Structures are given as C-alpha cells and as structure tokens.
Image (cartoon, helix red, strand yellow):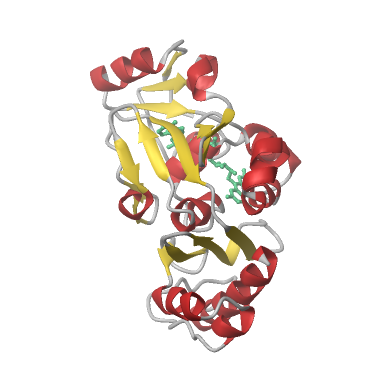
Amino acid sequence: MYDFAIHKPASVADAVKIMAGDPDARPISGGQTLIPALKHRLNKPSAVIDLSGIAELKGIKRDGDKIVIGAMTKHVDVANSAEVKAAIPALAKLAGSIGDIQVRNRGTIGGSVSNNDPAADYPSAVLALNATIVTSKRRIAADDFFQGMFTTALGADELLVAVEFPVPQKAGYAKMKNPASRYVMAGAFIAKTASGVRVAINGAGPCVFRQADMEKALSANWSADAVAGVKQSADGLNSDIHGSAEYRAHLVTVMAKRAVADAG
Ligand SMILES: Cc1cc2nc3c(=O)[nH]c(=O)nc-3n(C[C@H](O)[C@H](O)[C@H](O)COP(=O)(O)OP(=O)(O)OC[C@H]3O[C@@H](n4cnc5c(N)ncnc54)[C@H](O)[C@@H]3O)c2cc1C
C-alpha cells in the first residue's frame, strides 16, 4: 500500500467538507473493493475517509410507498430486514446472495452502488425498481445514475447517502454466478409497477442496462413465456475467460425467464 491519511468524520457534512478540500481523498464504507485495490497499489488516495462513524448513513425504513436504505447499511442487514422482506422480497434475496458471509457482513449498499462493478448485484435492483439515489447534493434517478463500467453520476466531492426503492407490485431476481468468484455472469431483475414493467440486466455488459424488448413483451403478457422468445444481442456484451458474449446473451433470456417466475 501507499501511505495515506485516515479521517473519521461523524457527519455527512464533515465528510463532504474533507472531500471538497482534498480531491484525492476517497470515502471507504465496507472496504471490500477499496482495500484490495489499495493493497494492489491500483489506487493512490491522499486520504481515506472512514464513513463507519456516521449514524445518519445507517439503517432501513419504510417511508410510505418507499423503502429507504442508508448507504452504510450492510448486505446482511438488507437480507435480514423484516421491512425489505415484506415489501420487496426479491431485494432481500439479492442481498443475501452477494458473495459470501464475510463479504455480506462488511460490504454496504452505498459502496456497491457507488462502485458500479458490471458484475455487482445491487445495480440491477436499483435500475429495475426505478430507485432514486440520494446524495449529499441532490437526488438522481436510476436511469441517469449508472453511466458505464465503474462509472456513475457521482461527482468527486459527492457522497451517496441513501437509496430510495419504490415498492413494486411484483419483482424477481435471477442470476448465473461465476462458480469461482460468485460474481454475476448474467442476471436479470424484473419489476412490475403501476407505471409499467422494468427489466435490468447485470453482469452481461460493461454496465447494467435496461432490456426494452423484454419490457415490451412483459407489458403485453406478464409470463415467463413472454420473455422466452426475446433474444438478447451479443453485440457489446462482455467476453472473457469465464464466458463469451454469445453465452452471456443466451443467459440473459434464461435469467429473465427465471426472474419472472421468481416474481410470480
Ligand atoms: C470475495 C468477494 C466477493 C464478492 N462478491 C460479490 C457478489 O457476488 N456480488 C456483488 O454485488 N458484490 C460482490 N462483492 C463486492 C462487495 O459486495 C461490496 O459491495 C463492494 O466491494 C463495495 O462495497 P463496500 O461497502 O465494500 O465499498 P468500498 O470498498 O468501501 O468502496 C467501494 C468504492 O465506492 C466508494 N464509496 C464507498 N462508499 C461510498 C459512498 N457512500 N459515497 C460515494 N462513494 C462511496 C469508495 O470510495 C470506493 O471507490 C464481492 C467482494 C469480494 C471481496
């Protein structure tokens, strides 16, 4: 590791003040991605801002027709939350399927969504459920948030504070895991809401994306059979030692069928 300073602010305002004064400082939440990056010297922040002492970033609450999850909420707490299980069971299931027990006990929703790893689970739920990202500066719609591989709309001095999930009528999630790393090879999160159907695909491409043909098919006929005939193009999908773009394209349809069945 390179040398860096450590700050431990007690409020979002204090954390943002440090970030604004030092553009090379990086926030750390669960450290499940940032610590390995530091260990491998892939990242050289001047300072690390430990968010673990900021109480306002933690917790889950039901607020009318929304579930609001604070950025520092760990995957294990989303998986076990009675509010999440009752309102959006697919989201609790997704959180409980991330990595392994150690990762779920350290990793946070804020770190995962800010990081926007193409193979991460949460971005698919955020996009399909049409969630709102609440930051230290503004509110960002999911459609505007995920901008490319490891790239989001967050500015350098902007902290992700919470994610607001509208409660859907139905939602389901299915993924094919890489058997070694457990990261997503291809996954589909599908939500039916009063304003329509949204289908988000993760793992298959460089960034989570919506599958418009599947949304159209499911709007006309909510059934696993409706997506079975919708083929995903392999153009632009990820191709690596774990699977070709064509294999991932095939998985997208299979995972979408399973996600609809999961939603019921
Ligand atoms: C072995 C292993 C297996 C894994 N498997 C999976 C898996 O199957 N599915 C999956 O989805 N994930 C998986 N992960 C990732 C893990 O779930 C974490 O979600 C992820 O590492 C990021 O969360 P974190 O809290 O650890 O963030 P950190 O590592 O602390 O931070 C990640 C990045 O986000 C920034 N950041 C953190 N918090 C904020 C904030 N509030 N505002 C702005 N920026 C912020 C940091 O500066 C950093 O750049 C795995 C990780 C490991 C180590």
> Residue 145 versus residue 27: which sits nearer the camera?
145
Q: Is residue 156 left or right of residue 39?
A: left
On the question of residue 191 being in view, the answer is: yes
Q: Residue 87's spot in the image, x, y percent? A: 63, 45
> Residue 84 versus residue 45: which sits nearer the camera?
84
Q: Residue 48's spot in the image, x, y percent? A: 43, 22
Q: Quadrant of residue 132?
A: top left
Residue lying at the far bottom of the rendered structure: 229
Q: Quadrant of residue 259?
A: bottom right
Quick one: quadrant of the C terminus?
bottom right
Q: Residue 217's spot in the image, x, y percent? A: 48, 81
Q: Is residue 131 above or below residue 174?
A: above
Q: Residue 135's spot in the image, x, y percent? A: 35, 32
Image mark count? 0
On the question of residue 40 being in view, the answer is: no
> Residue 81 versus residue 236: which sits nearer the camera?
81
Q: Residue at 38% across / 34% down in the picture?
A: 134
Q: Quadrant of residue 223?
A: bottom right
Q: Residue at 57% across / 76% down in the picture?
A: 222
Q: Is residue 83 above or below residue 251?
A: above
Q: Residue at 38% across / 56% down in the picture?
A: 149
Q: Residue at 36% across / 12% down in the picture?
A: 14
